[in-house]
Structure formats: C-alpha cells, structure tokens
Image (spheres, rainbow, N blue to C red):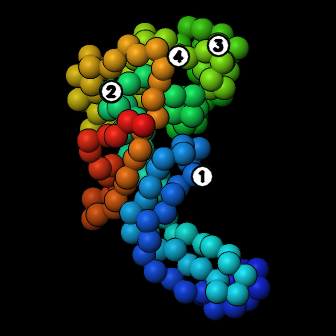
Amino acid sequence: MRCVVCGTGMTTQPENYRYTESGLPHVILRDVEVSRCPQCGEIEVAIPQIEDLHRAIAHALLRKPTRLTPEEIQYLRTYLAWSGAELAAHMGTTPETVSRWEHGATPIGKTADRLLRLVVATRLPGSADVLETLRGITATERPQSIRLSLARDQDGWHAAFPVVTL
C-alpha cells in the first residue's frame, strides 16, 4: 500500500487504535490494521464491519451504570440518525434542551436518560438486558464517561465488560 500523501510504501500492523472519530474520547479498538507512512507520518486505519462496531458502542453505552455524558447523548442521537429536533420530538422536549444536553450546559435528567436508552434499545438486537441495566443507573449529579475497549471476532465487534467509568 502506498501513502496517498507522498507515495511512499506504508507499513501495516495490528495496533490498538483510539477511535476518536466516533465523537467519544475513550473508545479503543483492539488489534485493527494501522498503516503508517515512514516518510510523512500519514496514518490509515482499516476498520472492518463499521456498522457492527457502532452498534457495539451503542450497546455498551446503554449498559453503563451512570447517566450519559454530552458526547454519549450526541453519539446515540447520531446512531439513531436523528437531528436534535427529531430527538426532541421523540423525547417530548425542545430542541434547545437537547442542545443543552449535548453541549454540557445542562445534564440530562434521570428519566430522559432512561427514555433515550430505551429508544436506542428498541433498535438494537440483543438488548433485552437493558431494562435491568436501567434499574441500576445511579442518580449522580455528574455524568461520567466510560472507557470502552472493543475487539472483533468471527461474530463481529464486542465491547469488553465490565465497563469502566472515568
């Protein structure tokens, strides 16, 4: 494989990759192919089954024991392919409220957090355990991010559990 920037041959090897493109700061993909250009430093990452990966991230967010962070709310809204106005309409709130949740001006309330998780869960296969998870969500005032480590096997992407809150 040649570098698209300078044309030099790239070296490829499996690495752990911080998947910041998800919009979440603490998502690590284990053993994905990363190609690096020794000349200019360009990096290319091959992420197979990306829809399955996004589904695994969404599923992991549903199972975290604390309320959703602004980045996680935005990730789940994007996963649903909804605008802020569409999410607001489904949640029975205003677009301004959704914007405040996503920008961290106002933390999402406990009830709205659970409703968002339920909406996402209805779209995810294998989410029957989400209702039990919802019972255990703590009502802490400060939402906490989670650190996700995801690996792929013959069945697709899977988050490593237990989920670690930061």
The secondary element bearing badge 2 is classed as loop
Judging depth in this view, the residue of 56 and 13 nearest the camera is 13
Label 3 packing within 10 angstroms: few (<14), some (14-19), many (20+): some
Numbered badge on residue 97: 3
Q: Amino acid at mark 2?
A: Pro
Numbered badge on residue 108: 4
The quadrant of the rendering that contains the N terminus is bottom right
Numbered badge on residue 21: 1
Taking the spot 60% from the left edge, 87% from the top edge, the residue there is: 10
Give the distance between the C-alpha atoms of the residues marked 4 and 2, in whole angstroms.
14 Å
Sequence-wise first label, 1 or 4 = 1
Q: Amino acid at mark 1?
A: Glu
Q: Are marks 4 and 2 in contact (CB under 8 Å)?
A: no
Q: Give the number of the mark in front: 2 or 3.
A: 2
Sequence-wise first label, 2 or 3 = 2
Query: What residue sits right under mark 2 in the picture?
Result: 65
Give the distance between the C-alpha atoms of the residues marked 2 and 1, in whole angstroms.
24 Å
Give the distance between the C-alpha atoms of the residues marked 3 and 4, in whole angstroms.
9 Å
The secondary element bearing badge 1 is classed as helix
Label 2 packing within 10 angstroms: few (<14), some (14-19), many (20+): many
Where is residue 114, by image quadrant?
A: top left
Q: Are marks 3 and 4 in contact (CB under 8 Å)?
A: no
Q: Amino acid at mark 3?
A: Thr
Sequence-wise first label, 1 or 3 = 1
Give the distance between the C-alpha atoms of the residues marked 2 and 3, in whole angstroms.
23 Å
Q: Residue furthest bottom?
A: 9
Sequence-wise first label, 4 or 2 = 2
Taking the spot 40% from the left edge, 47% from the top edge, the residue there is: 148
